[in-house]
Amino acid sequence: MQISQKAKNAIFLGTLCSVSYLAVYMARNVLGAVTPSMTADGFTLDYIGQVSAVYLLAYAIGQLINGYIGDFIKAKYMITLGLFSAGIANLVFIYLAKSSAIATVAYAWTGFSLAMIYGPMTKVVAESTDLIYATRCSLGYTFASFFGSPMAGVLATFLSWQATFGVSSAMLITMAALCMLFFTIFERKGIVKCQNNRAEGKSAGNKDYRGLLGRSIIKFSLVAILTGVIRTSLVGFLSTYFCDHLGYTKEEATSIFSVVTFIVCFTTFVAIFVYERLNRNIHLCTFIFFAVSAVSFGVLYFVSVPIVNIILMVAAVMAADAAATMLWSVYCPSMKDTGLVSGVTGLLDFLSYLAAALGSLLIPKLVSGWGWQNTLLAPLALMVIGTAVCVPYFFTKKTNNKTIGR
């Protein structure tokens, strides 16, 4: 079958973005991967937890600020600067790790720098390709991100914590150089375009902020918040759930966690498959995914057979992730004609990680006070809220070629 030039351009751009995002997610997961090595080297868990918390806060705030800036600056400059700056900050952290205050600031800068990537990347993909290709590009670099944690884990298995950080920094700096090179080549070949509303004869600074309300920004802000707690916070505690609640050993729980997270990697493909089969109706898909997750969590509450619990948990998490896929892979790229792709993506990412940070603080307290069985009522409630939020859109919104979901 003949591949169109538009499809080829999308493949080139999507591949560059996917490899870059793989480097980003490896850097994001390095600290967790090397924690055992760092504690063996004399660092305390409290110190590592402090560094991690400041990093996440800087990353969330960075998404908001850099997302906004990304609508006014070329993506190649934002992405290149973010990758290079994060690589340098990682190196600084290696040499100053024992100076807690300075090292914490350095690692916070890593988080802020890495937050310069996703919004501008989504913007350049949305503005340079048709929505159907933008969705697939987004799917590609979202899928690539899932391999960041395993890569960091593999390196941490064979290298010291300093060497692991060093390899991560080298990857970031290398990708910074490659992004500057290839984005420049893609611009000259017409693969990368910068719209900024020039096609409508508007100035580059003219952004359609008012139009966001008509594009369900409130609903999808809630989607970002609700799914952020599940896909980031809850998933982070699954190995503890398998061990403490289901009775598996630590080794078994770790193995099960690895298998479960690998299966969850394929959620994006499942979500887009369903989206295509349902005539690219983003509202219907989001409604269904939230409902499936709610039902899975609901049944999970009453089941006490370990293997069935695991299957239901995977189904619940995957369904919540599928709703998130509608947000990141369809909704954000569809903001192309507003001139606010980067800003909207940054805002939603900020809300998602802010909710995840809160969830990470609350889940241990709920487990301690209620036990795992009753704690599952919390994600159930979130998914019921998500389903309810989607109901009015499911019945009243109709998508067409000029609205989201097409």
Image (cartoon, helix red, strand yellow):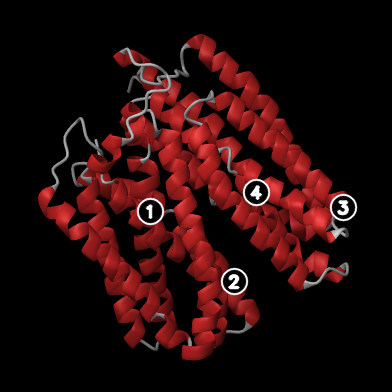
Which label sits in the foreground, 3 or 2?
Answer: 3
Q: State the residue position of label 1.
A: 324
Q: Which mark is residue 96?
A: 3
Type of the residue with mark 2: Ser
In the image shown, does 188 or 4 lie closer to the viewer? 188
| Residue 141: x %, y % from top left | 50, 40
Which label sits in the foreground, 1 or 4?
Answer: 4
Which one is earlier in the sequence, the residue at label 4 or at label 3? 3
CA separation, marks 3 and 2? 34 Å
- The residue carrying pointer 3 sits among few (fewer than 14), some (14 to 19) or many (20 or more) residues within 10 Å by Cα, namely some
* Contact? badges 1 and 2 (CB < 8 Å): no
CA separation, marks 4 and 2? 29 Å
Q: Which mark is residue 255?
A: 2
CA separation, marks 1 and 3? 37 Å
Type of the residue with mark 1: Ala
Which one is earlier in the sequence, the residue at label 4 or at label 2? 4
User: Is label 3 in a helix, a strand or a loop?
Assistant: helix
Name the residue: 43% across, 76% down.
Answer: 310
Which label sits in the foreground, 1 or 3?
Answer: 3
- Residue at the limit of the structure toward the left, as seen here: 395
Residue 313 image-quadrant placement: bottom left
- The residue carrying pointer 4 sits among few (fewer than 14), some (14 to 19) or many (20 or more) residues within 10 Å by Cα, namely many
